[in-house]
Amino acid sequence: MKPLLETRALHLSFGGLVAADHIDFQLYEGDRLAVIGQNGAGKTTFINICTGYLKPQSGEVWFDGKKITALKPRQIVRLGIGRSFQLPQLFSEQSVRECLQIAAARQNRRLSLFQSLEASVNIREVEETLELVGLRADAYHRSSDLPEGKRKLLDVAMALVLKPKLLIMDEPTSGVASEDKHGLMQTIMQALEMRKVTSWFVEHDVDIVEQYATRVCAWISGAIVADGKPDEVLSNPRISSEILGT
């Protein structure tokens, strides 16, 4: 079985700090991967390399059989890698619906001063995506007025409207009230399953990892030190001590 995304001997350091230590990594279609590790372990740096925001000093990134190491973020998005951020990247003055329309229009290169947003996108697909993530009732609310959980959902929706094969989420539950985290993740994971999107998410909440991941990678000092089923990785003595603090 060929990996959907693969890195080969990927290396990046900042001075004496090794952020990615010759990483060999494979992600397969259908995976629900949780990445865990202390702050500064290299998790977000690795995401930034795989999505084109940083270039490695050596090594390669491959996606769906294509080498993408040298590509720019927008080129990588068009190949099928979506991303949501720890701090949602929204158009703060626009409505929820308009945010999705802008994302879709930029993806199909039809965003223009001479054409309305309505005419630039497939409105049915926008409406279906709003329904999928439970934001139809908020469609005409300004995105900056949403509570944090719905801002996270909108960030995911803006990625989903681009029809990705893989969605990478950097701490999707951070800043969300404890009582709302599971509902948020349930909505996201159901949406990804409906769209048949492979997922990779960075997470610090062990309960979220246990419930929603099918695979866990643990990072320490720029290296993957454990990779396997959630119960195997989370019960690893080194992971318990150095990452989970138990």
Image (cartoon, rainbow, N blue to C red):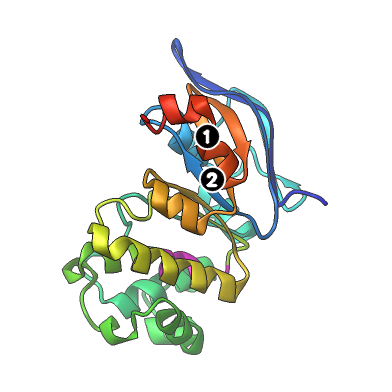
Residues 70 and 65: in front is 65
Q: Residue 190, percent across and down? A: 50, 72
Q: Pinpoint residue 231: horizontal percent, then vertical percent.
A: 56, 44
- Relative image position of residue 219 (x, y in whole percent): 51, 30
Residue 112 shown left or right of residue 25 in the figure: left
Question: In the shown orientation, is residue 209 left or right of residue 165?
Answer: left
**First-in-chain label (2 vs 1):** 2
The outermost residue toward the top is: 16
Q: How many marks?
A: 2
Horizontally, residue 29 falls left or right of residue 46, namely right
Classify mark 1: helix, strand or loop. Answer: strand
Instruction: Tell which of 158 and 229 is nearer to you.
Output: 229
Q: Is residue 235 magenta?
A: no
Amino acid type at mark 1: Ala
Question: Which class describes the residues within 10 Å of circle 2: few (<14), some (14-19), or many (20+)?
Answer: many
The residue under the point 83% across, 52% down is 1
Q: Residues within 10 Å of mark 1 (few under 14, many from 20)?
A: many
Q: Secondary structure at mark 2?
A: loop
Q: Is residue 192 above or below residue 139?
A: above
Q: What residue would you read off at disc 2?
A: 51
Q: Are marks 2 and 1 in contact (CB under 8 Å)?
A: no
**Which stretch did the figure color magenta?**
156-163
Residue visible at 42% across and 54% down? 208
From what the image shows, is residue 226 above or below residue 30?
above
Mark 2 vs mark 1, foreground winner is: 1
Tell me: 178 left or right of 120. Answer: left
Q: Residue 122 or 47: which is nearer the viewer? A: 47
Is residue 160 at least partly visible in the picture? yes
- The vertical placement of 228 against 219, above or below, is below
Vertical relation: 22 (above or below) 97: above
Q: Which residue is mark 1?
A: 218
